[in-house]
Amino acid sequence: MRRTRSSSRSSRSSRSVRTSLTALVTVAAAAGLGTLASPAHAATVVVSNSTDLSNAIKNATAGTVIQVRGGTYYPTATIQSTANGTSSSRIYLQPYGSETVKIDGSNLPDGDWIFKLTADYWTVSGITFQNSPDSAVVCQSCASTVWDNIKTINGGDSGFTLTGDSTTNNLVRNIDSYGHYDAATHGENADGIAVKYGSGSGNLITGARLYNNSDDGLDFWSFSSPVTVEHTWAMGNGKNRWSDSAFAGDGNGYKLGGDGETVAHVINNSAAWDNAGHGFTENSNKGAIVINRTTAYANTKWGYYFATGAARLGKNLAVSNGGGTVSKGSSVVSSGNNWDSGISTPSFRSTDASSTYNARSSSGTLPATTFLTTGSTTIGATMN
Ligand SMILES: [Ca+2]
Ligand SMILES: [Ca+2]
């Protein structure tokens, strides 16, 4: 009975989509998708229900453009694909026009992710992934993917994850990832962005806001190749916002290693504030981590914790951190930071963070703020 109703609803929906969108070059809907999509030509696929969305993603081929009609989608199984685009013929997943698209994991079984890609040359943009029972978005052994202005919100483990070997040349641009909490493990795992358990060069995170997650803002545990981060904010992580009596979140803004890896990650022009752990920490990574023109403000532990490794700390600004400005071992190279001799500490124009949560610019970049800005051209994050 249920099956019949569902099938009849689906075919009505297909007919009306075909009728109303005849101007499109190619419209493939629902069941006909596999036969309509030709590998030789870009196919635009417009979807308006969860089944069609899942099938379009699973069956995409190089050049497929998947446009998702506005609304909130409730998949009942992880949406996933192993289909590759190519450098000249990427696969796109994006909202239809300027419509608002949310994919909600509330109807997924416990432990499931909303979206998993094991694929190359995808561009995913403008979509919110929310309320996942576990991780929201996982890209496993992905190469040359672009994640543009997506949101991952209120999931049961990390918001956005890159993992696996052959994770190369991926770009994560202007993501918001917040409110993640792994209840069964008392918050010890859910990060805003996790780049963990894998390797591969050329990965860049830029323009991220990573906040109010139970564990860390960003975590590079057991990832053995350098990752670059810039124009990113990590704040309010590791606080017990869930009344968990055995809360175990770490709350580092930037957790830059672990599991014995020695890696020279690069962090430029980024900020960490109000985290329950350190602002920036090597987390046992003894590599030559480069941290330049960042700001650590009012974190509970150290602003910068690099007690054992060989980090290169340049032109960073640490103010009002509970543990102190910097803990640095003898192999750390430190110059131009406000804890180095002869370097003064410029004053902040504002310590009111409220504007940092504002809507992003029309191009998707971080909202304008004077928070933690100083006007200095030589030290600290520029907060944009
Ligand atoms: Ca942890
Ligand atoms: Ca973590």
Image (cartoon, grey):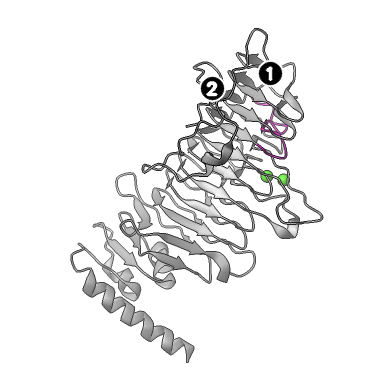
Quadrant in which residue 211 is drawn:
top right
Tell me the distance, in whole angstroms, between the alpha carbons under discs 2 and 1: 26 Å
Ligand 2 near label 2 (Cβ, under 8 Å)? no
Ligand 2 near label 1 (Cβ, under 8 Å)? no
Residue at point 60%, 58% (across, down): 155
Residue at point 31%, 74% (across, down): 32
Majority secondary structure in the magenta region = loop
Q: Farthest top residue?
A: 342
278, 44: nearer the viewer: 278
> Quick one: SS at disc 1?
loop
Which span is picked out in magenta?
274-287
Left-right relation of 66 to 117: left
Left-right relation of 247 to 123: right
**Residue 384 in magenta?**
no
Residue 213 position, x and y percent, is: 64, 48
Q: Which residue is mark 1?
A: 332
Residue 378 position, x and y percent, is: 52, 16
Placement of 73 over or under 265, stated as above or below: below
263, 178: nearer the viewer: 178
Q: Are marks 2 and 1 in contact (CB under 8 Å)?
A: no
Where ligand 2 lies, by image quadrant?
Answer: top right
Residue 80 position, x and y percent, is: 48, 61
**Residue 277 in magenta?**
yes
Tag of residue 374: 2
Placement of 364 over or under 297, stated as above or below: below
Quadrant in which residue 220 is drawn:
top right
Residue 44 position, x and y percent, is: 28, 61
> Quick one: SS at disc 2?
loop
34, 148: nearer the viewer: 148
Q: Farthest right residue?
A: 245
Q: Amino acid at mark 1?
A: Val
Q: Amino acid at mark 2?
A: Thr
